[in-house]
Image (spheres, rainbow, N blue to C red):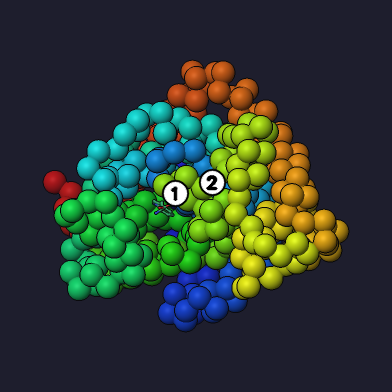
C-alpha cells in the first residue's frame, strides 16, 4: 500500500478541464462520462475518497447508489479511501448513539461487498488528528455567507430534530473538504446532494493554493463522479433511508427481505408497467429487481404483465435474495471475527494518519508555521 500522497500534477488535464460544479448537474453527468474514459485508460492517476456516516446498517439504496461503484473503481485499479465519518453523525443530533457498533457494522458492510483492505483504506476521521487540524486553515478560507448558501445543509437543518443548529452542522462541509483533501483525492463518487460540498472543497483547494502555494500546487481540485444509478424508493414510496424505516438493509435475512417487500406500497392497477413518473412505487420495485438481475426494468415489467403486484413482489424478493446471498454470506463470516474487523480499522486508521501527517506537514510549510 502506497501511503505517499499522489503528486498534484497527476490530476493533469483533469484539473484543467471545466469543473462539473460550475456547470450544473447535467454537465456533471457529461463530465463524469469523460472521467470514466480517463479512469479506464489510466486508473493509477486517480485517488478516490468517499464514505458514509456511521448511523446504521447500509441498505440497497446505498448499494446501487454508490457502494457497488466503489468496488467497481477498486477493481479497475483506482486507489480507494473509504471514510467512516464519525464526527459527522453529530451534525443533526446531540449524541452519537452506539457509535462503536455502527462503525463496526459499516466495516462489515464494506468487507461484505468486496472492499479489499489490502488495496483500499477504511478509516474513521475521528482517529486522524492531522485531518481534523486541516479544518482550521480551511475555515479561514470560506465566508459565513458561503456556508449559509449551501442547499444540502439548509435541507438538513430543515429536517433536523434539534431545536438549535450547531456550529458543526453549519461547518461540516468544510470538515468534509478536509476528509477529501487530506489524502489529495482527485475523484469523489457522489450523489447529487453532495455536489455543493464538492464545490466548496474545490473552492477551498483553489483558495489555499492561491494564498499559500508559492508557485506550487498543494491541493488538487477534486472532480465529482456522479452516480448514474436512479433513486431507489423505500417500501413506503419515499426515498429509501435509514431514518425512515423503509429500507432493505444488506444485512437483512431472506425472510426479513420477503416481509419488507411484501409490505411495500404499490398501486391499484393490476397490469405491471414501468413508468417512474405516474407509478413511482411499482417502478421502483421493478428497478430493484432489474438492478439485481442485470436487466432493464421494462423487461422485468413485460414478463410480469397482468400477473399483478403479488407476483411483482415475489420476483423482487427472489431477485434481491439471490443477488445478496453471497454478500450476506460474507457478512456473516466476517461478523464472526471481531478481531479481524478491529485490525482492518486500526490498520486503515494508521495508513490514513501517515497520509494526513504528510499533508499537514506540507500545509504548515506552505503557511510558514513550522516552529
Ligand atoms: N456526507 C456524506 C454522507 O452523509 C459522508 C461523507 C463524509 C463523505 N465525508 C465525506 C462523502 C467525504 C464523500 C466525501 O453520506
Q: Quadrant of residue 329?
A: top right
Q: Is residue 121 left or right of residue 294?
A: left
Circle number at residue 165: none
The number of discs equals: 2
The residue identified by callout 1 is 244
Residue 35 to residue 367: above or below: below
Marks 2 and 1 sit apart, C-alpha to C-alpha, by 8 Å
Q: Are marks 2 and 1 in contact (CB under 8 Å)?
A: yes
Q: Is residue 229 left or right of residue 57?
A: right
Please, what secondary structure does the residue beneath circle 1 have?
helix
- Where residue 87 appears, as percent x and y from the top left, is 30, 43
| Residue displayed at 61% across by 65% down | 280
Q: Extreme front residue here?
A: 268
Q: Quadrant of residue 308?
A: bottom right
- Ligand 1 neighbours mark 2 (CB distance < 8 Å): no
Task: Estimate the x, y position of residue 170 in percent, counting from the top left.
Answer: 23, 59
Q: Residue furthest right?
A: 303
In the image, taking residue 236 as reference, residue 179 lies left or right, namely left
From this viewpoint, is residue 122 visible? yes
What residue is drawn where x is 43% and y is 64%?
Answer: 193
The response on whether ligand 1 sits within 8 Å of label 1 is no
Q: Is residue 270 above or below residue 236?
A: below
Please name the residue that numbered disc 2 is placed on: 247
Q: Is residue 117 visible?
A: no
Q: Is residue 62 above or below residue 111?
A: below
Looking at the image, which is closer to me, 235 or 50?
A: 235
x, y (%) of residue 112?
A: 61, 34
How far across and down, in percent of the image, does residue 126 sit? 31, 39
Q: Secondary structure at mark 2?
A: loop
Q: Residues within 10 Å of mark 2 (few under 14, many from 20)?
A: many
Amino acid at each position: 500500500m502506497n501511503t505517499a500522497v499522489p503528486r498534484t500534477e497527476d490530476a493533469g488535464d483533469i484539473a484543467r478541464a471545466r469543473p462539473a460544479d460550475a456547470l450544473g448537474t447535467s454537465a456533471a453527468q457529461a463530465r463524469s462520462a469523460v472521467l470514466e474514459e480517463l479512469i479506464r485508460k489510466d486508473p493509477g492517476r486517480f485517488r478516490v475518497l468517499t464514505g458514509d456516516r456511521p448511523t446504521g446498517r447500509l441498505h440497497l439504496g446505498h448499494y446501487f447508489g454508490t457502494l457497488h461503484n466503489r468496488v467497481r473503481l477498486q477493481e479497475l485499479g483506482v486507489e480507494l479511501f473509504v471514510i467512516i465519518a464519525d464526527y459527522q453523525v453529530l451534525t443533526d443530533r446531540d449524541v452519537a448513539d452506539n457509535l462503536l457498533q455502527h462503525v463496526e457494522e459499516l466495516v462489515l458492510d464494506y468487507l461484505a461487498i468486496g472492499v479489499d483492505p489490502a488495496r483500499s483504506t477504511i478509516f474513521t476521521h475521528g482517529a486522524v488528528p492531522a485531518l481534523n487540524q486541516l479544518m482550521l486553515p480551511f475555515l479561514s478560507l470560506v465566508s459565513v455567507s458561503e456556508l449559509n448558501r449551501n442547499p444540502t445543509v439548509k435541507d438538513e437543518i430543515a429536517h433536523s430534530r434539534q431545536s438549535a443548529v450547531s456550529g458543526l452542522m453549519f461547518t461540516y462541509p468544510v470538515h468534509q473538504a478536509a476528509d477529501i483533501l487530506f489524502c489529495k483525492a482527485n475523484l469523489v463518487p457522489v450523489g447529487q446532494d453532495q455536489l455543493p460540498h464538492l464545490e466548496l472543497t474545490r473552492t477551498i483547494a483553489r483558495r489555499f493554493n492561491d494564498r499559500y502555494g508559492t508557485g506550487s500546487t498543494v491541493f488538487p481540485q477534486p472532480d465529482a463522479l456522479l452516480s448514474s444509478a436512479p433513486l431507489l424508493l423505500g417500501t413506503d414510496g419515499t426515498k429509501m433511508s435509514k431514518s425512515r424505516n423503509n429500507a432493505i438493509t444488506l444485512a437483512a435475512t431472506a425472510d426479513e427481505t420477503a416481509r419488507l417487500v411484501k409490505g411495500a406500497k404499490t398501486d391499484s392497477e393490476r397490469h405491471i408497467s414501468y413508468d417512474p413518473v405516474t407509478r413511482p412505487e411499482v417502478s421502483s420495485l421493478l428497478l430493484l429487481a432489474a438492478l439485481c438481475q442485470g436487466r432493464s426494468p421494462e423487461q422485468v415489467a413485460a414478463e410480469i404483465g397482468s400477473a399483478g403486484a403479488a407476483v411483482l413482489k415475489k420476483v423482487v424478493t427472489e431477485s434481491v435474495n439471490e443477488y445478496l446471498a453471497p454478500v450476506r454470506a460474507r457478512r456473516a463470516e466476517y461478523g464472526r471475527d471481531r478481531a479481524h474487523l478491529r485490525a482492518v480499522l486500526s490498520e486503515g486508521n494508521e495508513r490514513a494518519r501517515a497520509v494526513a501527517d504528510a499533508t499537514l506537514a506540507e500545509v504548515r510549510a506552505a503557511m510558514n508555521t513550522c516552529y
